[in-house]
Amino acid sequence: MSQTPNLFQRDANDQTVSERLAAEALIIDVDGFEGPLDVLLTLSRTQKVDLLKISILTLAQQYLAFVERAKQLRIELAADYLVMAAWLAFLKSRLLLPPDPTEEGPTGEELAAQLAFQLERLQAMRDAAAQLMARDQLGRDFFARGLPETVERVKHVKYTANLLDLMQSYSRIRTRDEFRPFVMDRENVYTMEQALERMRDLIGFAGDWTDLSSYLPQGWDTHPARRRAATAATFAASLELAKSGKVEIRQSETFAPIELRRKDSTHER
Amino acid sequence: MSDDFDDLIDPDDAEARAAHDPMAQDSLFDAPTMAEQERMVEAILFATAEPVTLKELSDRLPHGCDAAEAIVHLRKRYEGRGVHLIKVGDAYAFRTAADLAYLMQKETVEVRKLSRAAIETLAIIAYHQPVTRAEIEEIRGVSVSRGTIDLLIEIEWVRLGRRRMTPGRPVTFVVTQTFLDHFGLESARDLPGIKELRAAGLLDNRIGQVPGPTSDPEDQDEAEGQTEMFED
Amino acid sequence: MSDDFDDLIDPDDAEARAAHDPMAQDSLFDAPTMAEQERMVEAILFATAEPVTLKELSDRLPHGCDAAEAIVHLRKRYEGRGVHLIKVGDAYAFRTAADLAYLMQKETVEVRKLSRAAIETLAIIAYHQPVTRAEIEEIRGVSVSRGTIDLLIEIEWVRLGRRRMTPGRPVTFVVTQTFLDHFGLESARDLPGIKELRAAGLLDNRIGQVPGPTSDPEDQDEAEGQTEMFED
């Protein structure tokens, strides 16, 4: 980089009065700086040369003077300012001492070049930011439509159904009974409890052998399902009554009518 | 094409701007040209949030401008364009040309299946038309919500028929031509009858005769033809 | 392009549309004339304050229209007028000519005053995008406060870009279309001086050995340890 020729032109202690003053001026509004790079950039302006030609060594000295001054004035500097000072002190020594061939890592010149690049880049970004903000801006220099028309969002819901849907649906209504969900149909169930109750009432009057079927309740003897339910319940109930010794049951042969009568020994119900 | 718009993109250059605007320097003495006044009115009307009166225009234009004349020119320029310069009361504004109003709508179409309740109601109306709401409810065995019939009317598959000449004169519902078109039917009579539904296995055998359409003499003629469909 | 013209023609208003849109009947076969397309694009762009993308335009125009070509014609038509048709990213908008800014005091909205840090950060994001926070900090030499980037995101000038495929997968930041619109830029490539900066290598990402900001908590400790060394 172009600053190399300048590197050894100045002595470390050769600080001009103006530089010292500049450093002091910086101290006054140290809070106004955005970090060490910002300070370095400001200091670099005192060199009054193109950033490309800046002397990094001089800059390092200026910066170290700035930090020194801050310490004398007992101004607290943020950590990163001090880190930068340490780094610049290291850089300065690298730049001043003849290169040690055994040493690893970048040379002092390379480090100086990197710092110069960073300063140049930061300055470039600041210039770019200024250019950007100086552009014509929407709402200040040029304007959007002041009376925009709202774009109406029209949502059309298109309903569909086909003939099959229609027919199936109609069929479903017309055949609703078949589509009923499965439930125990209590309507056609005659329980043994019901039969027992009925027979207890009736058995007192039947002194003679009576067909079981005559005990079926009214309305349960025609519909096949109801008849089956009532018959089963009545039969179960008669067995129950026989068990408790209240009736006698007989059947003359297989599939012959089942008959029952009150057991004479039992009078109370 | 962006190159033509340097004036917008050019940075901060006050000089460039002054060059572009020949009036900037001497507008104190000479009014801008009419073409320039037209540009100005155009920009003001474009950017202002409400219609602008002639007075407001005059106040905002440089001294010596004739807003009314500029409006006349500008109005002519926008004749037949996508936006028109219109007069609103005693103010002016740009508005979309009326014939392009439909472009201001963003239409989205969502295809939705009819709900079961809706299609059942529709089926009953199709098979039993003209049919009152009470009849629909009787056939479906559940009440029919207002919204269901409204929807069917809204999508134009169902319309109001004649009022039934019974106490309360209830309205009846019938299906529309749109309905027939959608379902590819020539008439509601072409709807497959119970027999065909049964043959197609869509209907269970054990179901008896479908109660025919109401025997209201008024509606009889309309309903005629459907009755036979339901005969076994 | 609208993929299905049927979507646009709703049976509801097909008739109404046909009445005022001479194209409606035969647009399935013929696209509107270019003059007509130009009118349509003009109407759509005039009606919106936000830039409209080519795709949005195409979606709103009838089937068979060529929005891009209509834009070219329209742009030419508005050359030198009080309003211009500008390109913002892949979108288009009408904006008043910048040379007429002096007429627009009434419309001027107070542009939010950004801090120096925010402006610098914005410029870095615009010129270096996509850029990570660490990179912004390296360029500025200080840590970027969370609030700065948050503010830029809030005013919609900056948004998150893709994550960088490096260890830690850091998020990147890019500028938005709103940013381009605000500064009258067609694209980020049109940023002032960007070519020169690139040519000078100032937009390259060099990994520097210069001490940077200490945003990492681990680094923070080290830095604090060093502070003591320098204390009197």
Image: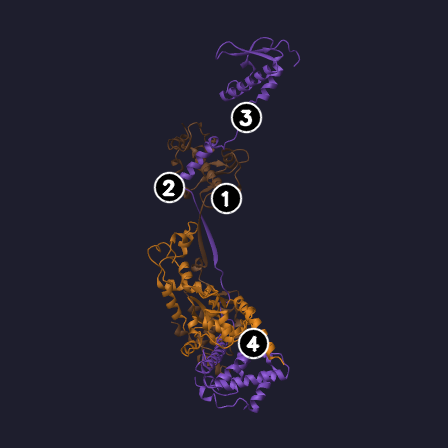
Chain colours: A purple, B brown, C orange
Helix, strand or loop status at disc 3: helix
Q: Amino acid at mark 2?
A: Gly
Task: Mark 3: give few (<14), some (14-19) or many (20+) Cα within 10 Å.
Answer: few
Q: Amino acid at mark 3?
A: Glu
Look at the image and tell me in which quarter the N terminus of chain B lies.
Answer: bottom left
User: Where does residue A168 sit, x and y in percent of width and height?
Assistant: 42, 36
Dot in front, 3 or 4? 4
Q: Return the residue at label 4.
A: A80
Q: Which mark is residue B184?
A: 2
Q: Residue at coordinates 51% horizontally, 84% vertically from top-left?
A: A93
How far is mark 2 from mark 4, CA to CA?
A: 81 Å
Q: Return the residue at label 1.
A: B150
Q: Amino acid at mark 1?
A: Asp
Badges 3 and 2: C-beta atoms under 8 Å apart? no
User: Where does residue B112 sit, x and y in percent of width and height?
Assistant: 45, 47
Front one among C163 and C30: C163
The reply to whether residue A137 is visible in this rendering is no
Helix, strand or loop status at disc 2: loop
Q: Which mark is residue A185?
A: none
Chain letter of mark 1 equals B
Q: Are marks 3 and 2 on the same chain?
A: no
Badges 1 and 3: C-beta atoms under 8 Å apart? no
Q: Return the residue at label 3.
A: A187
Dot in front, 4 or 1? 4
Q: Are marks 2 and 1 on the same chain?
A: yes
Dot in front, 2 or 4? 4
How far is mark 3 from mark 2, CA to CA?
A: 45 Å
Chain letter of mark 2 equals B
